[in-house]
Image: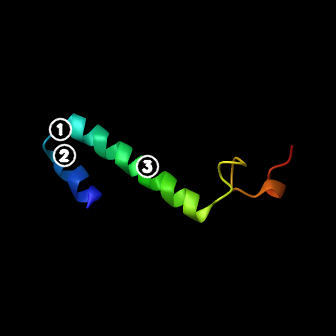
Amino acid sequence: DILREVLAAGAARDWDRMIELSQELEDLARSQKAILDPGADEFPGDGHPDANPG
């Protein structure tokens, strides 16, 4: 579980591991966003072209 690892790394002040885990969390968040909002890469914002004028 990434969050448990984050807590353990923070408690140990293992900054390199914290950075590595934060990158994993960012990648996970992006993959989840791609699943939930498939148009996000094409249209900034919510992924719906008509909600983004111009």
Give the number of marks.
3
Badge 3 or badge 1: first in the primary sequence: 1
On screen, residue 50 versus residue 33, left or right, reads: right
**Residue in the picture at 58% in, 64% down:** 36
For this rendering, which residue is in front, 14 or 49? 49
Mark 3 is on which residue type? Answer: Asp
3D distance between C-alphas at marks 2 and 3: 19 Å
For this rendering, which residue is in front, 24 or 10? 24
Q: Mark 3 and mark 2 in contact (Cβ < 8 Å)?
A: no
Q: Position of residue 30 (x, y in %)?
A: 50, 52
**Which residue position is annotated with label 3?**
27
Q: Quadrant of residue 1?
A: bottom left
Badge 2 or badge 3: first in the primary sequence: 2
3D distance between C-alphas at marks 3 and 1: 20 Å
Nearer the camera: disc 3 or disc 1: 3
Mark 1 is on which residue type? Answer: Asp
The secondary element bearing badge 1 is classed as: loop
**Residue in the picture at 35% in, 44% down:** 22
Q: Which mark is residue 14?
A: 1
Q: Residue furthest left?
A: 12
Mark 2 is on which residue type? Answer: Ala
**Residue in the picture at 56% in, 63% down:** 35
Q: Which mark is residue 26?
A: none
3D distance between C-alphas at marks 1 and 2: 5 Å
Q: Mark 2 and mark 1 in contact (Cβ < 8 Å)?
A: yes
- In this picture, is 50 found above or below 10? below
Q: Residues within 10 Å of mark 1 (few under 14, many from 20)?
A: few
The secondary element bearing badge 3 is classed as: helix
Q: Quadrant of residue 34?
A: bottom right
Quarter of the picture containing the C terminus is top right
Q: Which mark is residue 9?
A: 2
On screen, residue 33 versus residue 46, left or right, reads: left
